[in-house]
Image (cartoon, rainbow, N blue to C red):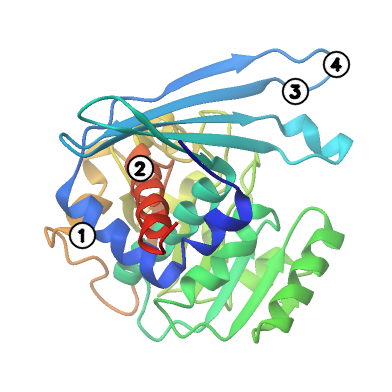
Amino acid sequence: MLILDAPTTRSLLPFDQLGPALKNAFSQGCEVPLRHNHSIEVEGTESGTMLLMPAWQTGTYLGIKTVTIFPGNTKIKLPGLYSTYMLHDACTGRPLALIDGNEITSRRTAAASALAASYLSRQDSYSLLVLGAGRVASLLPYAYRTVRPIEHVSVWDINQGQAELLVEQLRADGFHATVAQDLESNCKVADIVTAATLSTAPLVRREFLRPGTHLDLIGGFTPTMREADDCCFDGTSVFIDTNEAPMKAGDLLHPIESGVINVSDISADLTELCRGGHRGRNNSKEITVFKAVGTALEDLTAAVMAYEEYRNRGH
């Protein structure tokens, strides 16, 4: 059984190849049971969450990702999220590889966000506002740059020091990057606003969004997590990654419960976009909203890509 560590996994999943691989996977589909979601009590701080995410393609591969999310880790200077991925042969069940799940998760999340934006953002989008400065947030500009001519990136984070570190990194890699001191004013000038936080209170408000903006919400994955207020879903075109999103994401559950939006008002999911069942953005003035909670299809795609590429290199 192969063991692919974080640097190796990272090198095997470039965004310009991972994005098309995800598009193909969403077009073809695979078996994806509902994920298991378990709360883990932690004495003296916030509860943790454990996710179990299986997926398989008949006759080829099956895999399962385990994810642990512990928000209290920030207080002890540890990452809030850890994950591992086990890839198996789908015909025999034989374990093939143990792959760094953090790299799988962060890179497929950023790549799926950019894939959605290739349908939902304006083609001339060049300014990006990133909410968050963690592992996933730090990858979003690089993923978006493979689908849109991103030149200017603003970074907002509740911890300004973290935002400053990310801005330094982005500048070194050729972006014109700045720290967003004021969230509202930076939202109002961004072509794309993407949020990758663990917030439990809305950060983006409808009045922050100008016509033509694409709002990408990828951080919240439980009913108690929020990155946008209810009004962001009023009079906008709403898209999701999978049909699990309206069942689990606070960003959708709250406006649905308050009557701002119905599930039937959701325009399409990522599968429909990739298969050509929905064209995506209709015009340059439309405000589009994409809400993602992640899917094991993405994890399996990235794991298979890493495994096959590693073998193709002669290892």
The image's mark for residue 44 is: 4
- Indicate whether 29 appears above or below 84: below
Closer-to-camera residue (12/65): 12
Give coordinates of residue 41: x percent, y percent: 70, 12
**First of labels 4, 2 by sequence position:** 4
Closer-to-camera residue (26/122): 26
Q: Is residue 287 left or right of residue 164?
A: left
Q: Is residue 71 left or right of residue 50?
A: right
Amino acid type, callout 3: Glu
Find residue 129 and report its image quarter. bottom right
**First of labels 3, 2 by sequence position:** 3
Mark 1 or mark 3, whichever is nearer to me: 1
The image's mark for residue 274 is: 1
Count neighbours of disc 1 (C-alpha within 10 A) and say few if under 14, some if 14 to 19, many if 20 or more: many
Find residue 171 and report its image quarter. bottom right
Q: CA distance from mark 1 to mark 4?
A: 45 Å
Residue that protrudes farthest toward the front in the picture: 314
Q: CA distance from mark 3 to mark 2?
A: 30 Å
Give coordinates of residue 204: x percent, y percent: 59, 55
Mark 3 or mark 2, whichever is nearer to me: 2
Give coordinates of residue 245: x percent, y percent: 37, 37
The image's mark for residue 75 is: none
Find residue 101 and report its image quarter. top right
The image's mark for residue 46 is: 3
Q: CA distance from mark 1 to mark 3?
A: 38 Å
Residue at image position (74%, 78%) is: 178
Closer-to-camera residue (11/290): 11
Amino acid type, callout 2: Leu
Give coordinates of residue 125: x percent, y percent: 44, 82
Q: Which residue was labeled with disc 2?
A: 300
Contact between labelled residues 1 and 2, with CB atoms less than 8 Å apart: no
- Indicate whether 152 appears above or below 32: below
